[in-house]
Image (tube, helix red, strand yellow):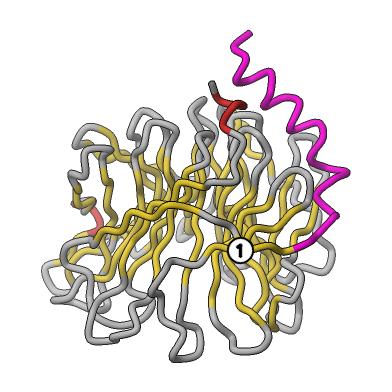
Amino acid sequence: MNSRYVWALVAAFLCLPIYAAGQVVQGKATFQTFSVPGTAVGLYNLSVQQISDTGFVSGTFTISSSPFSAEGFLRSPNGKTTILNDPKGNSPVFGPYTYGVGVNAFATVSGFYWDFTNLIFSGMFYQNGNFHTYNVPGLPTGSFTYIYGLNDLGAFCGFYQVPPGYTIVPYVNFAGKIDTNFNLPASVETLPYTVNDLGQVAGSWFDSSGTEHGFVRNPGGKIIEIDVPGAGSSGTSAEGINNFGWVSGHFFDAPNNYEHGFVLSPQGVFYQIDVPGAATNFPQGGTSGGALNDEGVLVGHFDPADLSQPEQAYIATLKFYPRYFTH
């Protein structure tokens, strides 16, 4: 067996009892920043979600010419950006509405789009210029399917909604089998964001007060809740988990409501991630963390102090990450 996955199996076994330690230190990293062409100026117009072990980056941006529309993107390791616009999610009146979320080592992107013909959200996969629609089988007409993360083995996760109530139902799809066992009794909304090659799912849930919490769900269904110590009332979002049990995401602090990225080690240490120069001159400004890969490379986006400029993306190589795991 490849030594990389031996270490991954060890990390998966150990992460459950030791995530609870919970101290926060400033994480050191080297940062590369880039812009996504066409991103509209202002907050919440860029979402950089995931990075594969081969260096592909995925996400979504709101386009400048149509602020109520969205397009996905795939950035290759050489810096080339491909805009993702599913033809079935493109209206001559409203423009495109395609979300890119997950990406795997083979440059397959997962996400969803608004189907203007059938007036539903449908899941989608993109690879080599081709879009493929996926809807959870067996749901009634008018149901919505969203795909977020996918792994290198073909598993993917997300949620679906069924009329008339459209309650969010989280799921993970393993080889065509839909598993909806996300047992979080206090949750009013559970959102799985990513799944690693071991079947661990990371995501967020919201309590009745609207506070967000992160979670990791192990393949047997047991869930570990994740909250960054000192996070404010907006809470903690877990956006990624790699094959060695390292979790990433973002949180808002209590004193100023600034956003910060974080990385959580299997030993329970939270590393705070802040892009140098990210805005701290207005509430909810700062650094948003996305997912990280097995090489200890994290992606996300940040708000510039000058709000006349669009949000920027970053790729952070973590200096504290033990790279001997992966070589």
User: Which quadrant holds the N terminus?
Assistant: top right
Q: What amino acid is labelled 1 in the image?
A: Gln
Q: Which residues are magenta?
A: 1-23
Of 141 and 323, nearer the camera is 323
Taking the spot 53% from the left edge, 21% from the top edge, the residue there is 327
Q: Is residue 38 in the magenta section?
A: no
Residue at point 51% right, 46% down? 292
Residue in front for this viewpoint, 292 or 195? 292
For the image, the number of numbered tags is: 1
72 up-or-down from 326: above or below: below
> Relative to residue 168, is residue 24 drawn left or right?
right
Q: Residue at x 40, y 59 (%)?
A: 121
Query: Where does residue 193 sit, x and y in percent of width and height?
Result: 56, 53
Q: Whole-percent x and y of residue 100?
A: 35, 53
Relative to 227, 326 lies left or right: left
- Residue toward you, 174 or 51: 51
Which residue matches tag 1? 272
Depicted 77 relative to depicted 283: above or below = above
Residue plotted at (23% across, 61% down): 36
Asked which secondary structure carries label 1, the reply is strand
Quadrant housing residue 238: bottom right
Left or right: where does residue 246 sit relative to residue 100? right
Q: Is residue 2 magenta?
A: yes
